[in-house]
Every structure is written in structure tokens, then in C-alpha cells.
Image (tube, rainbow, N blue to C red):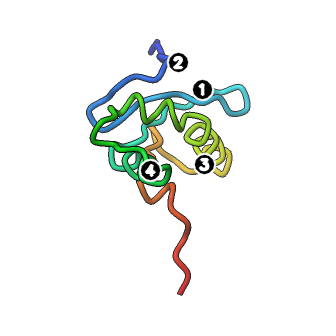
Amino acid sequence: MKSINTQPQLAQEGVAFTVNVDSLTHECIVTHDALHKLAELKSIDHDDSNAMEIFHAHEAIINGVARRLVGAGVQGNPLVMRSATFCAPRTP
């Protein structure tokens, strides 16, 4: 039986974390690029901030987006959230 860590932790690709949707725990990862994009949106100097600091500064947004993606049926184990995940869709 695999143990799931419920606390965010630094991973090679970014920050790994979990969300609960419909009483099920889903593993997710937000990439370093996505974290840097979030830092830019709030004018945080990501050169002076580490990935965990940026994650915690945007944790509510990241968790909310992850829960909505899982609820919408987006697949992935873990569910990988890249910078495009946090950008508005481009219109023609």
C-alpha cells in the first residue's frame, strides 16, 4: 500500500502536493515554470524566492485550480500543472 504525503514537498520537477476531491486524494505537481509564472503575475522576484515560498504564496490558487481540474476529469498521476495551466486561453 502506497503512503501519500499530504504536505507539499519539493520535487525535481516542481512542488508535489495533494488535493481531496469527492473524498479521494489526488497527487499533483506544479512545475517550476508554473511557479515562476505565478510569481511574475504578482510581481514577486522569483530569483530571490525558492519554489516552496512561491508555492505557499499562491497555495490557495494552486489548490483551487488543481481541484477544478480533477473535478473536470483531467487525467494524470500525478496531475502536472504547467505554466499554461495558469494563463488565460488565447482567443483568435
What's the residue type where badge 1 is placed?
Thr
Spot occupied by residue 45 in the image (x, y as percentages of width and height): 35, 44
What's the residue type where badge 2 is placed?
Thr
Report the residue at 51% width, 55% height from top. Answer: 86
Secondary structure under tag 3 reads: helix
Label 2 – label 1 distance at C-alpha: 9 Å
Report the residue at 41% width, 29% height from top. Answer: 53
- Circle nearer the viewer, 4 or 3: 4
Label 3 – label 2 distance at C-alpha: 18 Å
Q: In the current view of this chain or complex, which residue is farthest to the right?
A: 22
Name the residue that disc number 4 marks.
43
Figure check: 16 above or below 44: above
Label 2 – label 4 distance at C-alpha: 29 Å
N-terminal label among 3 and 2: 2
Name the residue that disc number 3 marks.
69
Report the residue at 46% width, 49% height from top. Answer: 38
Name the residue that disc number 2 marks.
6
Number of residues whose C-alpha sits closer than 10 Å to that of mark 4, classed few (under 14), some (14–19) or many (20 or more)? few
N-terminal label among 3 and 1: 1
Mark 3 in CB contact with mark 2 (< 8 angstroms): no
Name the residue that disc number 1 marks.
25
Label 3 – label 1 distance at C-alpha: 13 Å
Figure check: 85 above or below 44: below
Q: Of the numbered discs in the image, which one, if any, rests on residue 58?
A: none
Report the residue at 44% width, 15% height from top. Answer: 2
Number of residues whose C-alpha sits closer than 10 Å to that of mark 2, classed few (under 14), some (14–19) or many (20 or more)? some
Q: Out of 73 and 16, give the one closest to the viewer.
A: 16
What's the residue type where badge 4 is placed?
Ser
Spot occupied by residue 55 in the image (x, y as percentages of width and height): 46, 34
Spot occupied by residue 77 in the image (x, y as percentages of width and height): 45, 37
Mark 2 in CB contact with mark 1 (< 8 angstroms): yes
Label 4 – label 3 distance at C-alpha: 26 Å
